[in-house]
Amino acid sequence: AQTVTQSQPEMSVQEAETVTLSCTYDTSESDYYLFWYKQPPSRQMILVIRQEAYKQQNATENRFSVNFQKAAKSFSLKISDSQLGDAAMYFCAYRTLPNYGGSQGNLIFGKGTKLSVKP
Amino acid sequence: NAGVTQTPKFRILKIGQSMTLQCTQDMNHNYMYWYRQDPGMGLKLIYYSVGAGITDKGEVPNGYNVSRSTTEDFPLRLELAAPSQTSVYFCASSYPGQVNGYTFGSGTRLTVV
C-alpha cells in the first residue's frame, strides 16, 4: 500500500525568507500524481501545486516550487519570499492513476506540517 | 460556481444519536469521497464512489454508511454516534483522470458528547 510521510510536524519561517517542507512516499507504481495542499484556519483545502511523476521538470507556481526526486521518492515544497498568509497546515498527497470502477485514484495524505510565519 | 457544498458546517451530537452529513457537487464529477480529519492528523478516507449506485469502503469505514443515488449527491450517515467520531469531515469530488486532484467542500466539524 502507498504511504506518505511528512517528518516535520511544525516549521517556522521569517517573513520574506524561504522555507522547505519535506515529504517522502512509498509506492511500487511508476506513474502517479503528487500534490501539496494548504489548509488555513478556515479549514478549506486549497491546492498549492501538483506534479505528474512522468515529468522530470519540477513544478513551479509563483512563489511555490517543488523538488521532485522520483528515485528517492521525495517531494519537497519550497516557499520563497514567505508571507504572513502562508501560515497554514500543509499536506503532501499522493494519487495513482485511477481506473474506472477500480479502487485506484484515491488521494493518500501525509499527517501534515504546520507552518508558522514570523513577522 | 458552487463546487462542492457540505451541510451542516458544525454539529454537536449526543452519544447514540444518528445524523446525515450532506454533500452535493455541481461539476458532474464521477468520483466522490468522504474523508475525516482528526486533530493533528492528515485526512483518512472513509468511503468513496466512482459513480451513481457504486460505493466502496476506504481506510476507516466502521460506523458509517453512504449512498449514491445521483451523480450530484453523496450523503454520509452516522447511525450510532460515538466520541471516536468527533472529527472534521470533508467531502470531495473529481473526474477519474483529473490531474488537479480533488475539489473539496469546506468541511463539517462534528462533536460527539
Image (spheres, rainbow, N blue to C red):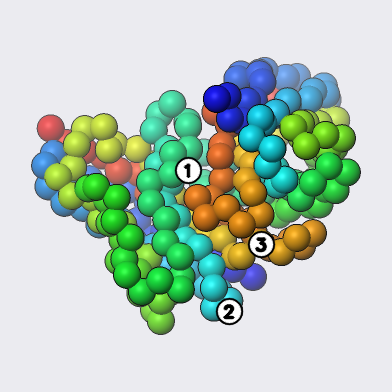
Q: Quadrant of the rendered structure where residue A39 is?
A: top left
What chain does mark 2 sit on?
Answer: A
Q: Quadrant of the rendered structure where residue A31 is?
A: bottom right
Split into 4 quadrants, where in the image is the N terminus of chain B? top right
Judging by the rendered image, the residue that carries numbered circle 3 is A98
Judging by the rendered image, the residue that carries numbered circle 2 is A28
From the viewer's perspective, is the residue at label 1 or at label 2 nearer? 2
Residue B110 can be seen in this image: no
What chain does mark 1 sit on?
Answer: B
* Label 2 CA crowd tier, 10 Å (few <14, some 14–19, many 20+): few
From the viewer's perspective, is the residue at label 3 or at label 2 nearer? 3
Q: Residue at x 42, y 56 (%)?
A: A50
Q: Earlier in the sequence, mark 3 or mark 2?
A: 2
- Which of the two residues, B80 or A71, is positioned nearer the viewer here? A71
Name the residue at the bottom extreme.
A71
Q: Residue at x 54, y 68 (%)?
A: A32
Residue B44 can be seen in this image: yes
Secondary structure under tag 3 reads loop
From the viewer's perspective, is the residue at label 1 or at label 3 nearer? 3
Image location (x, y in percent) of residue A84: 21, 32
Under mark 2, the amino acid is Ser
* Label 3 CA crowd tier, 10 Å (few <14, some 14–19, many 20+): some
Q: Residue at x 11, y 42 (%)?
A: A16
Under mark 1, the amino acid is Gly
User: In 3D space, how far apart are the residues under numbered discs 3 and 2 (Cα atoms)?
Assistant: 15 Å
Image location (x, y in percent) of residue B102: 56, 45
Is A49 left, or right, of B7 in this rendering?
A: left
Secondary structure under tag 1 reads loop
Q: Say if labels 1 and 2 share a chain.
A: no
User: For residue B40, which numbered disc appears in the image?
Assistant: 1
Q: Say if labels 3 and 2 share a chain.
A: yes
